[in-house]
Amino acid sequence: MQYDDECEEREYHSLNADTIVGYLEETGSFASFFDHYEERPSQLDLVRAITHCFNDNAIGVFEAGTGVGKSLAYLLPAFEWALVNKVRVVISTGTINLQHQLIDKDVPDALKILGEKPDMPQAVLIKGRQNYLCLRRLMQTVQEPDLFTQDAEELAAIQKWAQTTDEGTRSALPFMPAPGLWSKICSESDNCLGQRCPFYTSCFVMKLRKKAEKAAILIVNHHLLFADLASRQDGAGYAATAVLPPFHAIIFDEAHTIEEAASSFFSHTFSRYELNRSITTLSRVKKGKNVGCLEKITAVSTKAELMPVIANALTKTQAAYAALEAQALNFCGSVSSLSFTQVPAAKTAALLALCKDFAGELNKLNNALAVLITNAEPNDDPRYEDAVREGGIALSRLQDIAETLEHFFQWTQQPDYVFWIEKMQSPGGEVPRFNQTPIDLADKLRHAVFKPFDTVIALSATLKIGNSFSFWMGRTGLLSFSSKEVRTGTFDSPFHYEKNVLLNIPTDAPAPDDEQFQAFVNTAVARLIEITGGKTLVLFTSYESLKQTCAFARSELPDMEILQQGEDDRSRLLHTFKEHIDSTLFATTSFWAGIDVPGEALTHVILVKLPFAVPSAPLFRARADAIERKGGSSFMQLSVPEAVVQFRQGFGRLMRSQTDRGIVTLLDKRALIKQYGRIFIESIPKTKQCFASLQEIVYNIESFLY
């Protein structure tokens, strides 16, 4: 099947919404797969709304509660649209896990529902390139004589696996390879030989690219999609293949996360990892011997006399960066991240002075490298050709760092960006990373997403604040958007929250800023998980608070299995929590969203505090300042809405199936006593409620459960 790769305006054949809705009605094809089938009115309404958006080239912003069945609600119209109009549709998810759920479960269901049709569109799952094994780099690494024992064992296992795997993705490996090893053997766009590669015909990425070109439905994640859109904005255009083949429509699942995903692709960053990666490609010492590509390049360059200059420049560049790193850590002090506008001008000036020292040495290195590499003549010898190519890649990456540095020197002339330093943890201690991030992505998203494509559908269980979509639409550029029609809709969960969920807030809890609050949390959490016999997810906003409460609970309840985030791999923790029904999991930010634990294993969700962002976080502070400069309230226009979305995500961990039943306890009484608190309560489904003392809540839980 050929798909139209031209993105200019074109005539489309409309879909019959009644026909597509009919597939999911009690008399439809989906019902025939079940002994007892109940149609979901909210799902049928969502199918109709999405179909009309395709027909009318409109944008749809739809909130669909848990259990609506939104995957089939968008897959059926997407397949029909691709089939009838011979165009490509991208479905973008927030996580790779959801990508797999779609391709493994929901897509096969959709195809069964639609039945046998000529030219039925294909769907293909596409991950970021670094998720795929590069056979050429694998063989290069195998031939390295000085691998560490552990790496050598893993490499041998990967080499054996590579002979039988169909897709070559890291997640398909039977074990998780060491990050350092995988980075040596994964596919990289700027390190790809294309048709000149000896492994071209068996390349996993090239096979995938051919499948994608034949497919009508591309299932990607937000990060990969924005890598593609950033490339198109940078000049690739919308009619040609960029990271993905060209497409005409986008469906965003988990659309509440697209601003965060887009932010990383419209940002500029660098750290020692980017620098060291290039420098070690050029020159490194192993077992007392100089290795790297510089020696081979020098051997075939007519400017070989530059080698001493380059060696000296490498040393000086690394020394200048070490001094800059020390100053950057001093710049941050005791906090994890800080922007240039959050400190006295003298402190920023001191940091930029060392940035300029580093830039000066880096530019000397880059200039000399460029001359050496440009004048290299490998004469079709593969050994020297590979070295020259690797040197060119390293130089290009170093030039990218130099370009980002130029932005930092001009930071006062770029008010639409925040320039900030963050501290990252590494095995050797804290490492600074330098960031330039756009403060407001609304205009970029308008031009990269909503204007170029015929239809864009944004779906999530958490797009509204109270009864309004205005916050999400404002952040993403859809407020006052006039290029095409924007439709909104709410499709309520079919789950029986009023009967099956009890919401508790203890009225005798100290305020979160009270010094007694942590002690109350310790006692309350221990009592609450004891009364439910585990089966509890406890969500914190602070890792320090988590550790204190977890230690207290373990001492008070030594016979209960209590899992703590950070003590094991995230996926293994989640697996243990699901399998060991009476266990309790203490977790922070990453567990507030995107985890799915249906059934008895998760009976109780405890939210320790309302999840307000740290007000001093650089990007948050910059966005808050921008609101204040326009005369707005950053608390009501940013802090509260962001916290409500996160709160709704945390609340949503409880009900994952029609038969689920359980409790959500919020230990933060600001939801009751603060004027803004009602927004949190009004943003979740109606439930049973117990707003009383902790003691009464314990009694109420007991009668609710038993």
Image: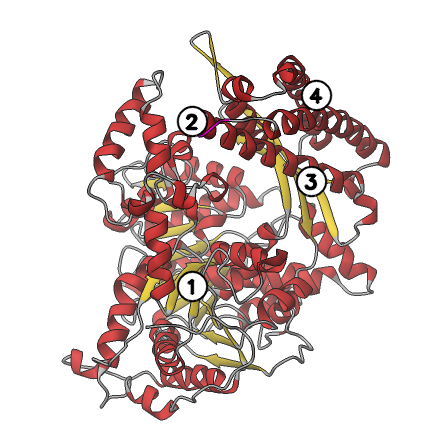
What kind of element bears circle 3? helix
Q: Circles 3 and 1: CB distance less than 8 Å?
A: no
Residue depicted at x 63% and y 53%:
266
Residue at numbered disc 1:
652
* N-terminal-most mark, 3 or 2: 2
What amino acid is labelled 3 in the image? Thr
Q: Which residue is mark 2?
A: 381
Furthest residue toward top: 288
Amino acid type of the residue that numbered disc 1 sits on in the rendered structure: Gly
Q: Are marks 2 and 1 in contact (CB under 8 Å)?
A: no
**In magenta segment, residue 549:** no
Q: Which residue is mark 3?
A: 404
Residue 322 place in picture, x, y as percent: 66, 21
**Relative horizontal placement of residue 612, taking residue 655 as reference (left or right):** right
Q: Amino acid at mark 2?
A: Asp
Closer-to-camera residue (641/218)? 218
Look at 39% across and 70% down and name the residue there.
Answer: 66
Q: Which residue is mark 4?
A: 320
- Whether residue 655 is visible here, answered yes or no, is no
Name the N-terminal-most of marks 2 and 1.
2
| Quarter assignment of residue 661 | bottom left
- Report the magenta residues as a range: 378-383
Tell which residue pokes out farthest to the front in this image: 379
Name above or below for residue 68 compared with residue 666. below
Q: Report crowding for label 3: few under 14, some 14 to 19, many 20 or more residues within 10 A (C-alpha).
A: some
Q: Rate crowding at label 1 as few (under 14), some (14 to 19) or many (20 or more) other CA atoms within 10 Å.
A: many
